[in-house]
Amino acid sequence: MENKKFFDDDLFLSSPDSFRIYDAVKNLPIIDYHCHLDQKMIKNDSELGDIGELWLKSDHYKWRAMRLCGVDEKYITGDASYFEKFLEYASIMPKLAGGPLYYWTHLELRQIFGINEPLNSESARRIYENANEVAKKLSVSDLLKLYRVEYIATTDDPCDSLEDHGIYGGVRVAPTFRPDKVFSFDREYLDKLGRAAGCEIDSFVSLCNALESRIDYFVSHGCRVSDHGFAFFPDYYPDSDEAEELFSRRGKLNAGERSALFGALLTRLCRMYAKRGMIMQLHCSVMRNVNPEMFDVCGPDSGFDIIGPVQSVSSVVSFFSQIPDRERPETIIYTLNDSDLRMLSCLSGAFRHVKIGAAWWFNDTVEGIRKNLSVISEYSCLGTNYGMLTDSRSFSSYARFDFFRRLLSDYLGGLVDRGEYDAASAEKTAIDICYGNIKEALGL
């Protein structure tokens, strides 16, 4: 049977107003202000290689889906060939109806490889061969040009050398300051950080000085963004003397004391970011590596993280109360537990320089994005939103921007269609969300 409407141009677009808005944003350049791409591959303009490798080498979204469908680990992170892994992934595709992977997979097939048929066991070998005929002619820079990528912010540890960041083929590749490992307060890591900063870390003050030195190094290499990932906001913020005392016995702290030391350092970093005009991203409500058996086999970032509990409202308020509005960096909050969305959206009106981020990770779905847009509209301010990012390790993931732009266009188009919003404002708001707001915030 011919699939006349299978992933055609009206995907998610339900009215003429939606189409008009989408036409205004579909070809805008992409500013990817949070991702996990390999900057060395961009610098070297690496080849795409086999579609099985492109899709299944490091994509924990796909790995998780394959486990959900009972695929043996051999074909996920094991030693099977990428052709075999691709066949297994294709076989589960019909089971993923309505899920983001189903949409992303077929958008990528259409946009990158010119293939517009359903992926399944029957079509797998044919699609694999046809896609690889295209892939062998493409490199990383070809994909970035295809999607009109203008700016990429990778995710980088404070100790990283950053020698592979720069401007390549018109794409600015900048580092993001991600100091999550610091908060383990592990002696081996602190020694590594001290070597990178050129100092000895033997006190809380010297740790702060080392981090400030590395922030300046990152800024000198084009860094405009920081990022933090954690389960919970701290409950308590010690003063300088207490922070020094906690640091001195950092290997013997209980959970509450460790959280307090985390809070003391996080608030100091906030001021450092604000002083340099950096954006601070906060990712919360995630529980990582919950399957100890599979963590031992596969390691981190392998599909064993889950949605964490909701945040304590008082803890979130306490955090933002530590920093006066004038000293707070532009802050984007992403929560993995979207039960927090209304509370966080409301909070963004109580403290300046706070925005709610894109629907993150498990929420990056059709209904998750729609909920994110509607809650921000009703409890915060949609017009100042910073829009989409990939948060991905795959260069083919830029199809997610089209996924988002279609859903945003349909949301705003629905308001226009019902007479609740004027068409000119809707178009401008869409352009701002998809491109203008984040470009201005980054000073590009």
Image (cartoon, rainbow, N blue to C red):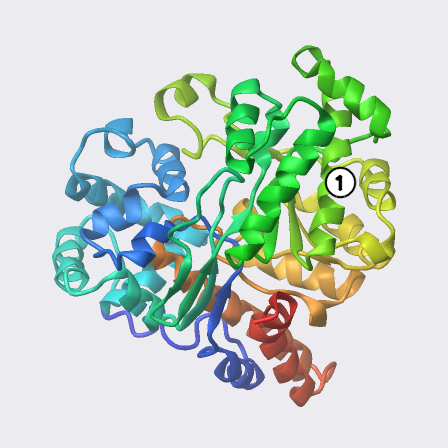
In terms of depth relative to the viewer, which is nearer, 53 or 340? 53
- Point out the residue furthest to the top here: 252
Tell me which amino acid carries mark 1: Arg
Residue 264 location (% of width, % of height): 77, 32
- Residue at the (86%, 37%) spot, across then down: 314
Give the left or right position of residue 364, taking residue 122 as reference. Answer: right
Residue 438 makes an appearance in the image: yes
Residue 97 makes an appearance in the image: no
Q: Image height check: is 319 above or below 439?
A: above
In terms of depth relative to the viewer, which is nearer, 331 or 196? 196
Q: Image height check: is 73 above or below 270?
A: above
- Residue at the (55%, 80%) spot, across then down: 18
Residue 110 location (% of width, % of height): 29, 67
Q: Residues within 10 Å of mark 1 (few under 14, many from 20)?
A: some
Residue 357 location (% of width, % of height): 64, 56
The quadrant of the rendering that contains the N terminus is bottom left
- Residue at the (23%, 66%) spot, across then down: 113
Give the left or right position of residue 99, taking residue 122 as reference. Answer: right
The quadrant of the rendering that contains the C terminus is bottom right
Give the left or right position of residue 430, taking residue 145 as reference. Answer: right
Residue identifier under label 1? 268
Under tag 1, what secondary structure?
Answer: helix
In terms of depth relative to the viewer, which is nearer, 417 or 405? 405
